[in-house]
Image (spheres, grey):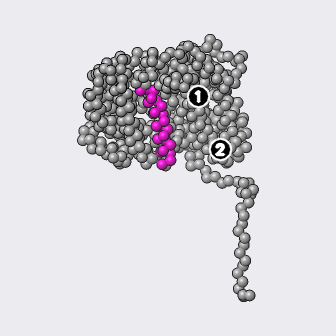
Amino acid sequence: MCTQFIDFKWLPELCRGNSNLLQGWLVDHPRKSLLACIPAVILGCGAYGFTMGLWQGWEMASYVGIKLPLVIFTVLLVNGMINGMLAMVLGSGIGFRESVQFLLAGFGLMAIILGALSPITFMMALHAPNPDDPGAQQWHSVTLLTHTFMIAYAGIISHRSLLGHVKRFATTAAHGTRTFFAWLAGNLFVGAQISWIMRPFFGSPGLKVQLLRDDPMNGSFYETVFRALGHLTGF
Amino acid sequence: MTNNPTPPERPPQIPNPIAQRTQPKITEPDPDFEAMKEKGGSNILNSLLKKPLSVVYELNKSPSSMLGTLCLINLVCLGVFGFVLGLFSAGDQLWAAPVKVIGGVFFSGMICLPSLYIFGALGGMDAKFPSVAGLMLTFLAITSLLLVGFAPVVWLFSTSSNSLVFFGFLSLAIWMVCLLFGMRVISRASRSMGGGNGGHLAIWAIIFATVTLQMTTSLRPIIGKSDKFLNLKEKRFFLGYWFEVIEDESTSPHRDIPDEESGRSTDY
């Protein structure tokens, strides 16, 4: 049962975008893909998350190491039902189970890329100034930009690979593309809010190191963006 | 002169645009417009998402066959969505919002049913009134099912958002997305029943959407708080009411909390 995960043969296959691998996962028992993708998300995102919070100390690093995989699983959980329904009504021929497997494979690949980048971000965190030092604010900005770039890169690469798989599996390439973009829009929309609820990840200098902020469910990511825009434009 | 004269070439025929327009268009039947393989609650749910036209086909054959199941699907799904909307204000809204959502959607469906029949006929749809009523129920069932799919997303924002305007527009955006999927089924069903490209049905779709938007104002408050269950005396157009709510929220003192103080704008 676990041999498929232990031998790690699937890992380079997933990175290469081997369609046979995903086809096999979809046809076989879902356990196979779950046993590969769930540990990949936990380990890859966990390791990367750990390095994200490390500049604020080991406590913050441990918190982010737990929270980053949680963000992925929560997005899948919240959007699971609507992703499956959208795949059906858009005529892709993809059902509930397959939609979860597809998205988990996509996030699995993203986690592998992030996991592979984590030694670099680990060393970066070790070279960071203390959060109380005068250069901490500048370092915070550099960290924020670097991590945003790396996560965006991993996200784009993994989703490009996922799009290819969805197009091949769907009834027609057009139906597959439509379904993929519907999933993407939903996941981005919900993902932004879930990551906002689970903040802090980088930890602003001067603010407390916490697993979650005191009022995690108070307000939304989009309200904050609108408010910031309002302050900028004066409206 | 030759003994074997070739017949003079006939001038090329100029296509007559009027004749082309009046010729009936032969559309290929939709492959999904066929009998359902299996019946029963879960199969109807599955068919509504995968092959909604098979449900319409069954309703055309015997309009009363699935009416009960479709009504039940609508009631449960709209009730669940209404409950999730009610979580924004909690308290009495937990029961008032589902009642208003169910009542508002069914009432909109009822008042728009005659126009669906007439506009469908104008477009060439060959269907009796009970079949059109069945089509309306199928359309509402698909819309309601998708609303339930979005319920976890709405719940996420209903428990975390502080802004009535943001949450209201999010709910309306989700409602419109679900409506679009439902409208697609009406359009496909119309073509399967002999209708044309659906210009008349597009107008009907706009009318239906506008009616449901007005319902959100007529049945107010659905997501906000109020001492009264309904406010039928004070009549408002939905756009005017929305602008009023936006203005109220933008001038409320809650808005002036600086982001730096709450630590939200820089904290990630």
Residue at far front of view = A134
Chain letter for mark 1, please.
Answer: B
Query: Where, by quadrant of the figure, is residue A64 drawn?
Result: top left
Residue B67 image offset from top left, x and y in percent:
61, 33
At which x and y percent is residue A30?
36, 38
Quarter holding residue B111 = top right
Most frequent secondary structure within the magenta stretch: helix
> Tag count in the figure?
2
The disc at residue B190 is: 2
SS class, disc 1: helix
- Quarter holding the C terminus of chain B is top left
Q: Chain of mark 2?
A: B
Whichever of callouts 2 and 1 sits on the residue coming sooner in the sequence is: 1
Quarter of the N terminus of chain B within the rendering: bottom right
Residue in the foreground of this view, choosing between A56 and A213: A56
Is residue B115 toward the left or the right of residue A183 in the image?
right
The residue at 70%/22% (across/down) is B236
The local crowd at label 2, few if under 14, some if 14 to 19, many if 20 or more residues have their Cα within 10 Å, is many
- What range of the chain is rendered magenta? A173-195
Q: Is residue A133 above or below residue B194?
A: above
Residue B95 painted magenta: no
Residue A145 vs residue B219, the one in the foreground: A145
Residue B88: numbered disc: none
Q: Amino acid at mark 2?
A: Ser
> Which residue is denoted by mark 1 in the rendering?
B172
Residue B213 in view (yes/no): yes
